[in-house]
Image (tube, rainbow, N blue to C red):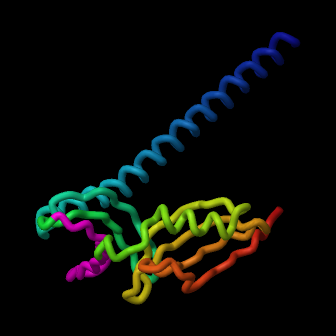
Amino acid sequence: MTNTKRKWFIYSLVGIGIILISLLAYCIYLYQVINDSRTSEMDTTKTQLLEQTSYVDIHSIESFHGTNSYHVLEAMNEAGEDKLVFYPLEGEQRQLTVFDMEDMLSKNTLIETWQSSCGSCKLVNVTPALVEGEAYWEITYHDNENNYVMNYHSITDGSLQEQFKYPKMFY
């Protein structure tokens, strides 16, 4: 009787182990598929921009999702000028929105200014944003009260234009 219970217990543990390993493998696979889908769209945007415009080099690419979604590229044109390019992800006629990087406040300068004004805050991300045709730096962070905060700063002089605070709902 004891031997039968022990076999049942071992078979149950092996079965649960197989299920957990299978679940972990599926989660890893799902993550890779989703991440490949996201990055392949960026590769497509990069290829289209290089083939169809006068841009010769793309330094970086990231996404911004506001009212409209964009791929945001830091690119160099044939004249050697660095540009910030907003590439819309919707619509058949995609109109690029372009800004001269020499007219912009650098990301590092903005972060230094922000850190001096909010020393105990935890930075999440800084990304270029395009809202109603105006370019901003979007800074997302957790403040000292653990609120999730989104600041929109002017891309030219760094002045704060808009701020959203979302309080933590669960402790």
Q: Is residue 58 visible?
A: yes
For residue 22, which quarter of the picture? top right
> x, y percentage for residue 49?
19, 66
| Residue 89 drawn in magenta | yes
- Residue at 61 percent across and 60 percent down: it is 123
Residue ranking furthest to the right: 2
Q: Is 131 rendered above or below residue 12?
A: below
| Residue 75 drawn in magenta | no
> Where are the magenta residues, as a range?
80-99
Residue ranking furthest to the bottom: 132
For the residue pair 68 and 79, the one nearer the viewer reads as 79
- Residue at 13 percent across and 70 percent down: it is 53
* Quarter of the figure with the C terminus: bottom right
- Residue at 34 percent across and 76 percent down: it is 103
Residue ranking furthest to the top: 3
For residue 18, which quarter of the picture? top right
- Residue at 48 percent across and 74 percent down: it is 137
> x, y percentage for residue 164?
63, 80
Q: Is residue 89 visible?
A: no
